[in-house]
Image: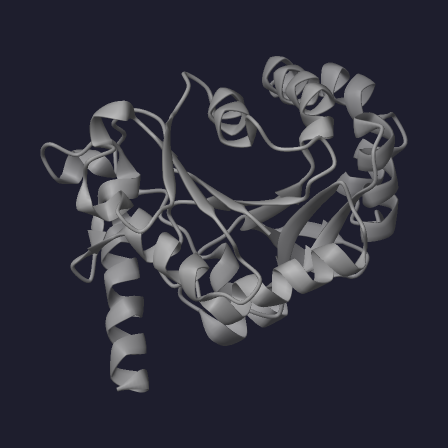
Amino acid sequence: MNAIVLAGGGADAVSATVSGLPNKAFVEIGGIALVERVIAALRSAPGVARIIAVAPPASHDRTALAGADERRADGARMVESLESGLSGAAPDELLLIAASDLPVLTPAAIAEFLEQAQARDLDVAYAIVSQYVHRAAYPNVPHTWARMVEGRFCGGGLVALKPRVLPALRVVLDDLGAARKSPLRLAALFGWDILPRFALGSLTVEAAERRASTILKAPAGAIRCTHAEVAVNVDRPSDVALANGLVEAAAKRDG
């Protein structure tokens, strides 16, 4: 499977901690840029073929992107960066999309996600990690948890999708952006039966998958990952120190 690493966007609070960086993807953790770490994990993962890095054009000659097979320009919005990465792929080709801020991502975690996504024959597959699994591995890493019937889950930084779903996905993302502060508009998007069940913790993962499939008009599903590192990312300046600590601990453990 070909892989796309999304390292686009402008400077943010994380990249502002170091001068001269395009965005947080280029912040170094343990002396290695976040995006470089992700590319290295993908390169070592069985089943990953070509790697495309989507990043600001001015960053394309940086060492952090040297491990990618191809570098493409990012867009003003994430969906535009995604379109750039998917350009030229066959409509029904399943591609791996990886966030660029996963400091402890491993080849084993990638392989597990790919195997499950391919086995389920989905058009959109989204990594999730249970609170139980995550806290056992990374008890000090904070997350926002979604309460489902099967337990509490957080999202991960890996997605697999087929380009043919992109038009519907673009509409959904635009609608979500417009409705994020309006419960009524969210209800109109997801359905009046879904939001109350989610709020009360009575929504199953399967029911959520069915509704997502209906909205996208394509088979969509959540991949329950047993490797918690797919959900460890760097969102805030405080996460930089936390990530450095995790990388240092992993190096001592493996060494």
Q: Is residue 45 left or right of residue 233?
A: right
Query: In this rendering, is residue 146 above or below 180?
Result: below
Q: Is residue 101 left or right of residue 203?
A: left
- Residue 244 or residue 27, whichever sits in front: 27
Where residue 234 sits in the image (x, y, percent)? 35, 48
Q: Which residue is found at the position 38% from the left and 63% from the top? A: 104
Number of numbered discs on residues: 0
Q: How is the image coloured?
A: one colour
Observer able to see residue 91: yes
Q: Which residue is found at the position 64% from the left and 59% from the top? A: 114
The C terminus: image quadrant: bottom left
Q: Which residue is found at the position 37% from the left and 43% from the top? A: 235
Q: Is residue 115 left or right of residue 45?
A: right
Where residue 106 sits in the image (x, y, percent)? 44, 67
Where residue 14 sits in the image (x, y, percent)? 25, 39
- Residue 244 or residue 113, whichever sits in front: 113
Q: Is residue 137 left or right of residue 248?
A: right
- Quarter of the view holding residue 183: top right
Observer able to see residue 239: no
- Quarter of the view holding residue 21: top left
